[in-house]
Amino acid sequence: MRKFLLITAAGKGERFGGNIPKQFITVKDKPVIIHALTAFFKYKADIKVTVVIDKEFETGLKENLLKYFPEKEFYIIKGGKTRTESVKNGLETIPDLSLVAIHDAARPWVSRNLIAKGFEHAEKHGSAIPFIDITESVREVDGKLNRSVNREKLKLIQTPQFFKSELIKNAYKSINRLFTDDATVLEKAGFKIHLFEGDRKNIKITYPEDIKLVEAFL
Ligand code: C5P
């Protein structure tokens, strides 16, 4: 099946702060999003890529794409106010009967091995969602009360998330609420989610201190 990448980069990174969103910050000589794209091109040099972007950063992105990947072509699509809307817009560029990886530009350390596993599992199961175990203790807080939760039953979910394209496209058409990831959209549309083991180093940059961790890995 043909393979596509949809990379979400239209967020403002409000929790991160600063003038430019976290996905465009330079880490180890390259913008974060360029590291993420490089990982996918290492897996498959001719993977077709759609980047969802805010108008304000489109020119800068195009300059960087030309600088780092002069021989490649990209679909550049306008993002929405929320991640859900941004993915919806981007999915319009993905054909049916193919596989799509949906990845947050703010995760620059995705490995080639994780990408390969994800596409394999998605071809077999329809979806493939990477998880990692929780190593800290967890409590559920409800107003002034709180109680312990069995962490064995809880997993942290990462991107990229992999899908048969028509499944996730139809799922996004069927929802009218906002969700923080694509697996939840597919689940709400009535499908079972297939999980596979992700990678602890596949860190999502959210706060400035996360940059230090990513620098250590890159
Ligand atoms: O805000 P958060 O870190 O959860 O965003 C996850 C990803 O979704 C980021 O890569 C961000 O750029 C993207 N996003 C988007 N459009 C939005 C909001 C977030 O593409 N409106």
Image (cartoon, rainbow, N blue to C red):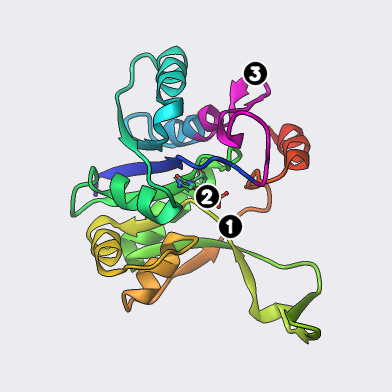
Mark 3: secondary structure: loop
Residue 84, above or below 64: below
Quadrant of the drawing holding the C terminus: top right
To which residue does mark 3 refer?
Answer: 29
Query: Residue 198 bears which disc, if any?
Result: 1
Number of on-image labels: 3
Q: Position of residue 93 (x, y in %)?
A: 23, 42
Mark 2: secondary structure: helix
Horizontal placement of 47 versus 109: left or right? left
Query: Residue 114 bears which disc, if any?
Result: 2
Q: What stretch is highlighted in magenta?
A: 15-36
Lower position in the chain sequence, tag 3 or tag 2: 3
Q: Disc 3 marks which amino acid? A: Asp
- Whether the residue carrying mark 1 lies under 8 Å from ligand 1 is answered with no
Between marks 1 and 3 in the image, the one whose residue lies nearer the viewer: 3
Residue 73, above or below 11: above
Mark 3: give few (<14), some (14-19) or many (20+) Cα within 10 Å. Answer: few
